Image: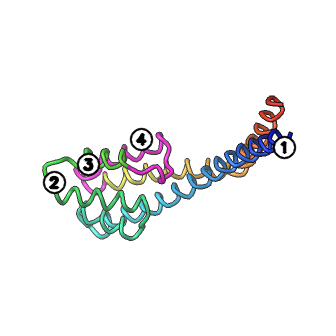
Amino acid sequence: MYIKLLGAILVIVSSSGLGCYMAAQWGEHLKTMETLKKMILLLKGEIVYANSPLTEAFERTGKKAGGGLGDLFVAVAERLLRQQAEPFYTVWQEEIDHLPKEVCLSKEDKQHLKGLGEHLGYLDMDMQERNILLYLEQLDLTIDYLRKHKQEKSRLYTTLGIMGGLFLTIVMY
């Protein structure tokens, strides 16, 4: 009797925890996208206004931002300095593919980020700026969507976690 009750409580608590975790992931994704937007704005300033070479621009941006995304930018800069023969886009794609799971980006976000690197480095400054501005517009749309649905999705995930736990408990009894 007590073991069944303890099992039921554990199922409800664990499924509720999963729901809360999913809700927190939504918020973390929003925070990551906002950080990425700030970093891209910094990168744009380095390329367009400071007229920095790509390696310096990425290194400075990565060091200013820090965190997982900052490490991405610094790693790209270091690889570009070490291996002059590899094209920028190849380095950019490989480093994005090696991002740790702690950097909360969806597959779609990573594809958009890879698309940004496709036109950096070999076009003239005006075209690079336009490409960055286009990417910033995509980021704004994603951030607006995440903000608009944050409360709704958080409530949904939390409720589904609790209700799922209750349902499992009822089915198991």
x, y percentage for residue 92? 30, 49
User: In 3D space, how far apart are the residues under numbered discs 2 and 3 (Cα atoms)?
Assistant: 9 Å
**Residue 126 vs residue 18, the one in the foreground:** 18
- State the extent of the magenta-drawn residues as a range: 99-127
Q: Which amino acid does label 2 sit on?
A: Gln
Callout 1: SS: helix
Q: Earlier in the sequence, mark 4 or mark 2?
A: 2
Callout 3: SS: helix
x, y percentage for residue 84? 14, 54
Pointers 2 and 3 in contact (CB under 8 A)?
A: yes
Name the residue carrying label 4. 111
Left or right side of 81 for 169: right
**Residue 112 vs residue 4, the one in the foreground:** 4
Q: Which residue is drawn at 32% across and 64% down?
A: 48
Q: Residue at x 37, y 50 (%)?
A: 131
* Quadrant of the snapshot with the N terminus: top right
Q: Earlier in the sequence, mark 2 or mark 1?
A: 1
User: In 3D space, how far apart are the residues under numbered discs 1 and 3 (Cα atoms)?
Assistant: 58 Å
Callout 4: SS: helix
| Colour scheme of the rendered structure | rainbow
Left or right side of 35 for 81: left
Q: Earlier in the sequence, mark 3 or mark 4?
A: 3
The magenta stretch spans residue 130: no
Single out the mark in the foreground, 2 or 1: 1
x, y percentage for residue 150? 67, 51
Q: On residue 2, which mark appears?
A: 1
Name the residue carrying label 3. 91
